[in-house]
Image (cartoon, coloured by chain):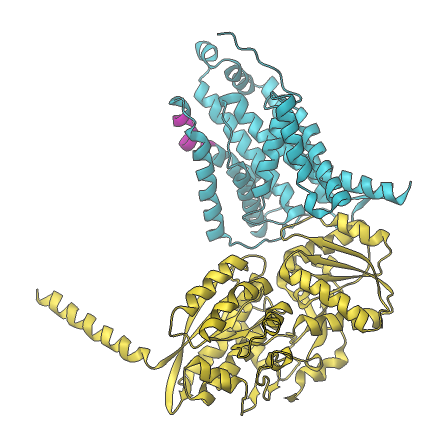
Chain colours: A cyan, B yellow
Amino acid sequence: MDAKYIALAQMAVGGGLMGMAYALVAYGFQLTYAAGKAVNFGQGELVMLGAFTGISLAGSGLPYGVSVLGAMVAGAALGWFVERVAVRLALKQHNEGWILLTIIVGLFALSFVENIWGRDDRPFPVPWPAAPLDFYGISVTWPELAIAMGALGIMIFVELAKRYTMAGIAVQAVSADPEAAELCGVRSSSAISLSWAVSGAAAAFAGTVIGPVTTVGPTMAAALTLKAFSVAVVAGLDSGFGLVIAGIALGAAENLSGYVLGSGWREAPGLLLLILALALRPQGIFGKKIIRKV
Amino acid sequence: MKASRSILAVLLATSFSTVAMAADVVKIAITGPFSGGSAPMGVSMRDGAKLAISQINQNGGINVAGRKMKIELIERDDEGKNDRGALVAQEISSMGDISAVIGTVNTGVAVMGDKYYVEKGIVKIITPAAGSASMTQWSKAGVKDLPIFRFASHDGIQAQMVVEKALKLGFTNVAILHDATNYGVSGRDDLIEQISRQGGKLKVVSVEKFAIGDKDMTGQLIKAKSAGAQAILIWGIGPELAAVASGKEKLGFKVPMIGGWTLSMSNFIDTAGASGNGALMPQTFIEDESIARAKPFIQAYHKAYAVSRIPSPVSAAQGYDAALLLAEAIHEAGSTTPSKIKLSLENLKVTVKGAIADWKKPWSKWNPSNVETHEAFRRATTVMGKVQNGRVVLANPSEKFVLEGTAVK
């Protein structure tokens, strides 16, 4: 193959793999949106907290896998906490205060991290081999593969749990119709709490797989939240695996435009994509149009 | 009642005593990025300077016209941000009783903030910011009387050495990578100028930039690789330099990185890990206890801050020597007035024995057409360092004599 096309393919593949990280964070948005019609605008801070928790656990001598699990537990607790303190009351009162409140909790998390861990970026040690893999001239590193595998793994795991466990079915029932679910004996507040906890765990997991690629610092996820939200909106907040396609497309488009047009143009396609999607398909490219009968 | 009266008495007594003390101190400010991507340099510079100051204070302080005066420090974190740096400079220059300032790591901060010191005539020793613009801005403006001095091997020297090294290693095609800050852009210009000054024997096959915070450099590196670059000449700071090193590893692009002294930053060395080995950069100081001159300083620093490795040895040693030189200047001026300190810095009588060299009259009277008058370092006082297994060592061990050197200039 021509070197020029290999270079383009390299950029697209690298971007697409990072795009899986966007999809994973977007999946966290989707989970809480399905259950309680709210999202955590501090999701990026949960990613960052997850990464720092993982680094600290790994630094204390625990193996990588255990550190990741520990970070996910912490993330789940935090997700639950955000729902409990910032979202539940606002939703009960039918106001939009949760938007601001989740942002505020995120800002608190940021100050907390800056004071505990400091403001400097640090590497996240991983047990994977350092040498990259080569696919027909395209290099892929192990941490990049870990993002893709991890993101898919978490999504498949949660989607299966939603379909085949009692708790998962309860969450689905609540997301379809909270009142009907309550009548059938499902406590909707618990189902919503559960989905926030799972969303928090997914965010923390994202932190532990993104950290090895980007290094870990308080602002590591600042841009990530916005991109993941774009992915969620473009794909549709109830699109399931549509997120993966939108995430890969955004990541690849960013990298390609940075390469072809110059590094200053990296962010442009994502924004264009968002505007186009909102103009043409407001319910999301893979979203279902919901017709509400009053 | 009685108790409150006695408390009042104590308060009055202590307030008087601080007034009496205030007359016996010299106030010096240290500014730099103590957080963020440049923090290893800022923190090391600050701690190096504080080490010198605490040693001076332990010996009773500076003898100013027959009176022993202790040094009082004011520290400000500019976070490496230009706007924040300008605010810090405004604040310090309006305090009214600051004799001198040591610091600044980021060239952009010096460009944005130093005008406030120049307006008020406050002496500042820039260290370790190396970007050419922090001094050339004053020669371009034709400032006649400049209280700003530099104590760092500036980018002009560094670019010269980087180009010399690339030629010596026999390269003909190189890529230039730089960050989009004032530091990176002026570094790129210095490199291009040096290449033509040294006979234009290096062909620049690709010039690529990156932004602070970028983690993925594969795009820039693919372009450099496909253009046939045999080496990467690079100007940036730690985190992004590390991203370039790991991108090189990913692409199997095994060419050396030669660049500014920032390649010695701990956040480059630690983050890049094995992929950073072999990076070459100019250094004014190497953390190597086998260098007799450097040993006491290295040991004192390790002991004072309970570390086994200085985050940025060059910054620490320059901060230390800059503080010693400043103290000597205040002593020779016999005054804490900035204008008098400036005059004695321009004409130091005593040779100051530092961790880097014996400083014999490092600066002279400012001449706008020759910035070297306020630059302390020369090509001959700078060596090439190399990253090797988590530390910076001499690239060429035979250059050790430069760092042992007794009389400079």
Horizontal relation, residue A16 to residue B230: left or right: left
Which x, y percent locates residue A164?
61, 18
Which x, y percent locates residue B29?
45, 71
Quadrant of residue A279 within the rendered picture? top right
Q: Quadrant of the N terminus of chain A?
A: top right
Q: Identify the residue at horizontal 12%, vertical 65% (top origin).
A: B4
Residue B224 visible in the displayed image: yes
Residue sitting farthest toward the left: B1
In this view, A44 is above or below A181: below
Q: Range of the magenta residues?
A: A80-90
- Decide which of B352, B134 is in the foreground and name it: B134
Which x, y percent locates residue A22?
64, 35
Q: Identify the residue at horizontal 44%, vertical 30% (top origin).
A: A98
Horizontal relation, residue A199 to residue B55: left or right: right
Q: Identify the residue at horizontal 81%, vertical 39% (top origin).
A: A9
Residue B252 visible in the displayed image: no
Is-magenta flag for residue A81? yes
Residue sitting farthest toward the top: A293
Horizontal relation, residue B64 to residue A265: left or right: left
Horizontal relation, residue B36 to residue A285: left or right: left
Q: Identify the residue at horizontal 66%, vertical 49% (top origin).
A: B214
- Decide which of A180, B101 is in the foreground and name it: B101
Is-magenta flag for residue A82? yes
